[in-house]
């Protein structure tokens, strides 16, 4: 009797499935950005395309001051650090960036990682281990689930944004609350809804559990200084650890975690994804620091994102494609199935509009959605053009009824 397939056979099976599903056609998995023209425009298949599927929420990846800072660092420090932070890769730029992050959040300590994914691996893996409990919102990002699996902690989930269910899970876990890490996101990136941090942080404060909030998609967009949803909801003092990324609003790559709890001051030395990988390239670090200074003082960009989100949300609702969450920098509309979703996504792209198509298991509740994001770099004309393209594509594919 044959046993389980070997590594090559299993890998070939995955490849065959992919080939059959795409048939050589353009899909969300093989789009190539041929040239980036601006934070919200790119060339795809030789066509100038409006980008409503990037994470450049504030347009800082093309900000002149950020580009200048990156160029100066490139000239002074070279293209890369060539070592980890505990070897020769601990440059003054890295230390200055960590100080800037700590100052932005008004926290004592900050640690910079090479990606946001690695920030979750390092922070979570440094906090919990076998015998502890990691209690996650059911809609948390894959990096959070992977970090918890690698940590060895017992993984439990609670119903999305349901503080009462969180309290129940903690009470029934069989593990002391003092050994329990609760993990949520500030802004959930699939549907675009915001965490109920006031209710969730009340539960963790009352039980004594540790609370970690991933503000990856909310940094720069929420709160008076752009620190995220915890700041906007006035509960930062109840959040023990904040994790975030530089690959969204900051416009580069990298991740970080911040805390004021003295018990966690040595977190970097317990984080394997900090210890055993090369540090961020100097140009990236310099651009990130410049971007953070802009984020702290520029409320106009945040206001622009909010205004665009409201306009697009209202327009989609009027078309008969109501987004699945209130207006925000990220939104998603439900498709009736994978074929309809792919047909509509393709029609949009052919007409010059790029959005994301997401399917299970990346989406909750088996949803098939088209996800969009808005940027401060969009103009009112871009929003209007996007709505016109969506209306035409939706009628073409049958997702929308033909115009009367």
Image (cartoon, rainbow, N blue to C red):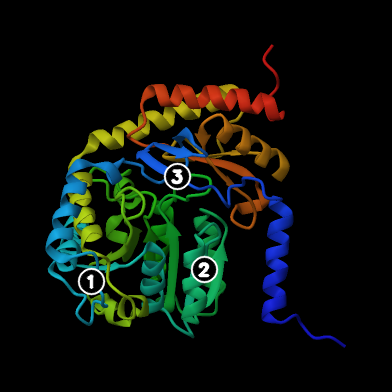
Specify the label residue 145 is tagged with.
2
User: Which of the image's four quarters has the N terminus?
Assistant: bottom right
Q: Which of 183 and 34 is in front in this view?
A: 34
Specify the label residue 53 is tagged with.
none
Secondary structure type for disc 1: loop
Q: Answer few, some or many: residues within 10 Å of disc 2's Cα (few below 14, many 20 plus, some between 14 and 19).
A: many
Looking at marks 3 and 1 on the same chain, the residue that comes earlier in the sequence is marked by: 3
User: Which of the image's four quarters has the C terminus?
Assistant: top right
User: Against 224, is 78 above or below?
Assistant: below
Of all residues shown, which one is farthest toward the top?
A: 404
Secondary structure type for disc 2: helix
Q: Is residue 354 left or right of residue 290?
A: right
Q: Which of 215 and 83 is in front in this view?
A: 83
Distance from disc 3 to disc 2, alpha carbons, whole Å, reads 33 Å
Distance from disc 1 to disc 2, alpha carbons, whole Å, reads 30 Å
Q: Name the residue under label 3.
A: 34
Residue 215 is situated, as x and y percent measured from the top left of the image, at 36, 55
Residue 69 is situated, as x and y percent measured from the top left of the image, at 16, 52
Label tally? 3
Q: Name the residue under label 1.
A: 81
Q: Looking at the rendering, which quadrant does residue 212 occupy?
A: bottom left
């Amino acid at each position: 009797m044959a046993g389980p397939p070997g590594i090559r056979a299993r890998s070939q099976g995955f490849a065959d499935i992919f080939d059959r599903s795409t048939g050589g056609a353009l899909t969300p998995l093989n789009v190539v950005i041929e040239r980036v023209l601006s934070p919200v425009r790119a060339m795809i298949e030789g066509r100038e395309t409006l980008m409503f599927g990037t994470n450049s929420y504030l347009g800082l990846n093309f900000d002149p001051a950020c580009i200048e800072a990156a160029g100066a660092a490139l000239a002074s420090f070279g293209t890369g650090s060539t070592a980890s932070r505990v070897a020769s890769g601990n440059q003054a730029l890295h230390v200055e960036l960590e100080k800037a992050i700590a100052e932005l959040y008004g926290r004592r300590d900050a640690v910079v990682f090479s990606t946001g994914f690695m920030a979750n691996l390092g922070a979570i893996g440094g906090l919990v281990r076998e015998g502890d409990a990691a209690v996650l919102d059911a809609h948390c990002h894959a990096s959070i689930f992977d970090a918890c699996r690698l940590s060895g902690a017992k993984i439990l989930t609670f119903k999305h944004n349901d503080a009462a269910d969180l309290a129940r899970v903690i009470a029934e876990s069989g593990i002391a609350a003092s050994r329990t890490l609760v993990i949520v996101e500030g802004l959930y990136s699939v549907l675009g809804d915001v965490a109920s941090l006031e209710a969730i942080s009340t539960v963790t404060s009352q039980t004594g559990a540790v609370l970690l909030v991933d503000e990856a998609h909310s940094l720069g967009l929420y709160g008076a200084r752009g620190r995220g949803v915890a700041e906007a909801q006035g509960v930062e003092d109840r959040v023990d650890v904040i994790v975030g990324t530089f690959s969204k609003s900051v416009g580069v790559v990298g991740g970080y975690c911040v805390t004021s709890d003295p018990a966690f001051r040595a977190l970097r030395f317990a984080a394997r994804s900090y210890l055993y990988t090369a540090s961020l390239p100097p140009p990236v670090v310099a651009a990130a620091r410049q971007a953070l200074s802009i984020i702290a003082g520029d409320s106009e960009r945040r206001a622009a994102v909010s205004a665009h989100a409201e306009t697009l949300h209202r327009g989609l609702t009027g078309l008969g494609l109501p987004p699945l969450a209130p207006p925000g920098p990220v939104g998603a509309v439900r498709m009736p199935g994978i074929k309809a979703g792919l047909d509509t996504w393709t029609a949009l792209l052919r007409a010059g509009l790029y959005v994301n198509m997401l399917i299970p298991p990346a989406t909750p509740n088996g949803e098939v959605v088209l996800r969009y994001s808005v940027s401060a770099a969009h103009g009112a004309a871009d929003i209007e053009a996007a709505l016109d393209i969506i209306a035409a594509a939706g009628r073409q594919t049958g997702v929308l009824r033909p115009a009367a």
